[in-house]
Structure formats: structure tokens, C-alpha cells
Amino acid sequence: MIDPGLCASCVHAKRVASRRGSTFVLCSAPGLPKYPQLPVRTCASHEPAKKKKD
Ligand code: SF4
């Protein structure tokens, strides 16, 4: 997968795999494109996702 940039650590991002094997980001933040062009380097709606405990 290409570097998703900020989306990699964002609570609004969901990684989706296509049938062809590529992966991309589905963004659930309101008012933004559903499929942002990666890598996202600046985003006003970025919210850090909480890290999961192992
Ligand atoms: S809000 Fe911004 S950083 Fe978060 S998933 Fe959407 S485009 Fe990526």
C-alpha cells in the first residue's frame, strides 16, 4: 500500500482492499471526499486514533 500519510493515524480512516489487491482509505469525516488522494499531508479533520492495547 502506498503511504497514507495522516490517514494512517486517523480515527476517521478505514482501510479498504480492492479486488485487485490494492488498498486505499475510506474517510468517514463529514465534508471530505470519501476517498482522499494519498498521501494526505494536511487535514483539518484529522483526529488521532487511540492506540490499541496489546
Ligand atoms: S479526516 Fe483527513 S486524515 Fe482523517 S481519514 Fe479523512 S482525509 Fe484522512
Image (cartoon, rainbow, N blue to C red):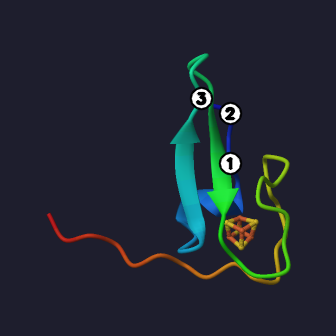
Q: Is residue 6 left or right of residue 39?
A: left
Is label 1 in a helix, a strand or a loop? Answer: loop
Q: Is residue 18 left or right of residue 4?
A: left
Is label 2 in a helix, a strand or a loop? Answer: loop
Marks 2 and 1 in Cβ contact (< 8 Å)? yes
Q: Where ligand 1 lies, by image quadrant? A: bottom right
Q: Quadrant of residue 10?
A: bottom right
Please name the amino acid that badge 1 sits on.
Pro
Residue 13 position (above or below residue 43)? above
Q: Which residue is mark 3?
A: 18
Is label 3 in a helix, a strand or a loop? Answer: loop
Residue at mark 1 to residue at mark 3: CA–CA distance: 15 Å
Q: Quadrant of residue 40?
A: bottom right
Ligand 1 within 8 Å of the CB at mark 1 = yes
Please name the amino acid that badge 2 sits on.
Ile
Please name the amino acid that badge 3 sits on.
Ser
Of labels 1 and 3, earlier in sequence is 1
